[in-house]
Image (spheres, rainbow, N blue to C red):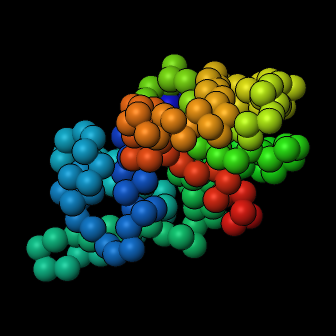
Amino acid sequence: MDLSFPYATLVPTLDGPVLQVLARSGKPLTGRQIQRIAARGSVPGVARVLDRLVDSGLVTAERTGSAILYSANRDHLAWPAVETIMALREDLFDRIAASLREWEPAPLKAVVFGSAARADGGPDSDIDILLVHGDNEPTPWSDEQYALGQRIAQWTGNHAQFVMVDEGRWQDMHAEGDPLVQSVERDGVDLLAIARAA
């Protein structure tokens, strides 16, 4: 699955980014605004998609002066499916966090980093996960790590890449300005925060 555009798994056409913009927008938008935000397709191409979505009822169009404003029709029977498709990346992180809640001992730190966290990878990108364990737990979670990797492959088609370090080494990496630490702090998705919020 392409975590940059996870909806492309089911909606590989320009309809996907157009629906994503409308799903995230809290206000009506013109076709030109939608094209600019989506950064995909041409203005005429987006206009054709919008015409089709208006015909299907998923999108409403209202003329205001010389402009046509488009909005998501969240009352449409198919809109819950659109919301599900648009939230695939967040759903993946929720599932990983739920799996981590079952681990004993619990990780001290668990973070998705790299392209999956930045949402700029491709369909073949690994899902990179940092796991920090206590200093007295040199080889924890071998079975759990394998099982989670298998689940991630089933959920997405992507491979999971785990980076496991102990707490002392992680602190040393902080002090050394390790690029991995910088990547985690800049882009990382804190899975334990998701687990605590659940």
Instruction: Please provide percent x and percent y for residue 179.
Output: 39, 31
Nearest the viewer among 67 and 56 is 67
Give coordinates of residue 47: x percent, y percent: 25, 51
Q: Nearer the viewer, residue 119 or 39?
A: 119
Question: As drawn, is 190 to the left or to the right of 117?
Answer: right
The residue drawn where x is 43% and y is 53% is: 20
- In the image, 90 versus 184, the foreground residue is 184
- Quadrant, the N terminus: top right
Q: Is residue 34 left or right of residue 121?
A: left
Residue 59 is at least partly visible in this image: no
In the figure, 191 relative to 168: above or below? below
Residue found at the far left of this picture: 66
* Residue shown at 45% from the left, 26% from the top: 122
Task: Look at the picture and state if 29 lies above or below 181.
Answer: below
- Res 196 → quadrant: bottom right
Instruction: Residue 81: give x, y in percent of width and height.
Output: 63, 54
Residue 5 found in image quarter: top left
